[in-house]
Amino acid sequence: MAYGKNNSRPGHTGGSKGVGPQGGGRKAQGGAPKNSKYGASQSGASRGKGKGKGKYSELPKRERRAPGRPYRSGEAFAHERGEYRANKWAGPHRPRRPRAAPVDHFDFYDENGVRLQKLMAQAGVASRRVCEQMITEGRVTVNGEAVTELGVRVNPADVVVQVDGMTVQTNDKLVYMAFNKPAGVVSTMEDPDGRPCIKDFLRSSMTERVFHVGRLDVETEGLLLLTNDGELANRLTHPSYEVPKTYLVQVRGPVESGVGAQLKKGVRLEDGVSRVDSFKLVDSAPGHVLIEVSIHSGKNRIVRRLFEAVGYPVEKLVRVEMGPVRIGSQKQGTVRNLSKVEIGHLLASVDM
């Protein structure tokens, strides 16, 4: 049944609030009007006055807190302290690692230097925590001396750091780059005759002065290392270290089966006997054969002279590897910085 304007509903027949079904003003014991089911009996004049004096007005005011923060005051949280960790959403508290005491009994210790684990992390070995683990496991040496304690400080310019026998490059001033030389470019930084040279392919903003490690003749393409590390350059080109260089050689084919054995055994040239370390047939096409050879000799035009001596003049020659560094998919005519891993392997290949 619909309720009218006079609030005609069961048990409520109209009139002022608090009036019963019979229209009589029922009063509670003591003479005070009894609150009706739908609200307290009060006049329009007094309605709205006396706020804060109701049923909940005498409770203590709740302490305000920042949005999203748990309510932490009071006795309930007295025993939690710092272990509570923001309503336990963050899990148990991880205790702070105690700071390592200085380890100054090494000759290379430098109190104004950089912590060893930080230096390793900056060099890209691993995160600082993993580097600390490497140190404590005895996998790190400094100037050939094993370091197993945290707290060692070193000067990056005065030490050689190795991890598992591989040298870590810690000197930011040293530069190591790979240049994919095109044919027709001379292996010099400048050419008085105006021919294309290495400097033409270096960015103009480069401030470091670099030099090439060894050289390739004008028509030979491929990998040429550039650096300002004089010690490394000397070792890579010194015959005693026998750093292998790998080339792809294209000659006219077909090639007789005994040519590879002959080149590995040794061929007498005008400056002595020379030989290749490996010989592998890569591909063949009508009139052409592609061969991969590896050789550690650094004599001038040695690959071209060897193949010419056995009756197969070279049509095209590309150096694809020098030591552990490969040209890979690097575009011709581009220069790139070697990765930390490549630098480490390159230094290790010549006992640095």
Image: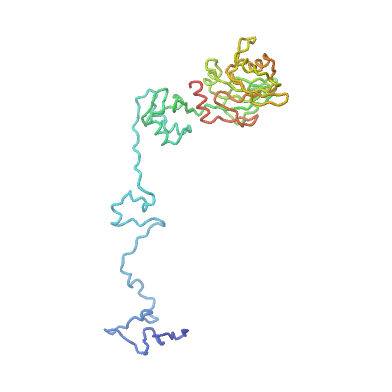
Q: On the picture, is 22 further left or further right than 184?
A: left
What residue sits 65% from the left and 15% below the top?
A: 306
Q: Position of residue 150 (x, y in %)?
A: 37, 31
Q: How is the image coloured?
A: rainbow
Q: Nearer the viewer, residue 343 or 308?
A: 308
Q: Nearer the viewer, residue 162 or 64?
A: 162
What residue sits 34% from the left and 25% below the top?
A: 105
- Please tell me whether residue 40 is drawn above or below residue 322 in the rendered image: below
What residue sits 34% from the left and 55% below the top?
A: 72
Q: Position of residue 26 (x, y in %)?
A: 32, 87
How many numbered tags mark residues here?
0
Q: What is the quadrant of residue 276 in the picture?
A: top right
Q: Nearer the viewer, residue 130 or 227?
A: 130
Residue 161 seen by the camera? no
Q: Residue furthest left?
A: 30
Q: On the picture, is 349 further left or further right than 276?
A: left
- Please tell me whether residue 286 is drawn above or below residue 263 in the rendered image: below
Q: Position of residue 348 (x, y in %)?
A: 49, 23
Q: Nearer the viewer, residue 259 or 223?
A: 259
Q: Residue furthest front?
A: 257
- Please tell me whether residue 19 is drawn above or below residue 240 in the rendered image: below
Q: What is the quadrant of residue 285 in the picture?
A: top right
- Please tell me whether residue 151 is drawn above or below residue 69 in the rendered image: above
Q: On the picture, is 350 further left or further right than 79?
A: right
Residue 138 seen by the camera? yes
Q: Position of residue 52 (x, y in %)?
A: 35, 71
